[in-house]
Image (cartoon, rainbow, N blue to C red):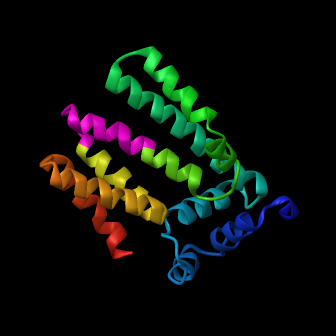
Amino acid sequence: NLTSLWNDELSTVEKSFQPSLSFLIDYLRTDVHPPFYYVILWLAGKIFGETVMVLRSFSWIAYVVGCAAISAAAWSYQKSSVASICALLLSCSIPFTVSYSVEGKAYAFLFALISTALVFRLRVIQNKPNSRYLYVLTSAAVGLTHYYGLGLLIAQTLTDGIRNKSRLFSCGCLALVLPSLW
C-alpha cells in the first residue's frame, strides 16, 4: 500500500521502480544521488515485485547484513566473541540507525556496504588473499550508493595517503574511479 510510505520513500519508489534499467539510468543522471542503490532496488523490484514490502525488506535485510559485518570486523580485529557481541549490540541499539533501517532509503544499504568494506579493509591489512579486490569493489559501491559514502571514501583514501599506507591508498584510488566517472 503506497499510502503507508513516507515522503522520502515515495521519492525512492519514483526513482527505483522504472520500466527499464536504461530508463532508470537516464532518470538518475538528473538526480543528485549516485545510482547503485536505485539500480539494486530496481533489480529487487523486478525479481520480487515492486511493493512496499520489497522496498522496506530491502532496507531491513541490508541493516542485518551491516550488523553482521560490524560483528565480523570486530571479530577479525580482536578475535574475541565479546568484541563481536558488543559490536552487534552497539549497531542494533542506536535509535537513529534502527529507525533508518526500516525506511525505504539508501541509509541501511550504505551501512551494510561500509561495514562490509571495513571487513575487507581489515583483511587487506592482514594480507589475506583476494582482499584488495573485494575492498576496492565494496568501497566503489559505497561511493556509488550515496554522497555520504563518497565523502567517506575520499576522506579515508586521503588519510591513507597522508599516513603512507600505500596498499590501502592504492585501493582507495581504484575505488574512486567509478564514482568519479558517475
Say if 170 sits above or below 144 in the image. Answer: above
Which residue in the rendered view is the most extreme toward the top?
81
Residue displayed at 46% across by 34% down: 70
The quarter of the picture where the N terminus appears is: bottom right
Residue displayed at 61% across by 44% down: 97
Q: Residue 129, can we see it?
A: no
**Whole-percent x and y of residue 78?**
34, 21
Q: Total of numbered circles in the picture?
A: 0
**Whole-percent x and y of residue 56?**
71, 51
Q: Main secondary structure of the magenta part?
A: helix
Image side of residue 140 versus residue 145, left or right: left
Who is closer to the viewer here, 13 or 84? Answer: 84
Residue displayed at 34% across by 53% down: 137
**Whole-percent x and y of residue 15?**
64, 73
Is residue 122 rendered magenta in the image?
yes
Image side of residue 102 versus residue 171, left or right: right
**Whole-percent x and y of residue 118?**
37, 41
Image side of residue 78 versus residue 168, left or right: right
Who is closer to the viewer here, 153 or 21? Answer: 153
Magenta-drawn segment: 115-131
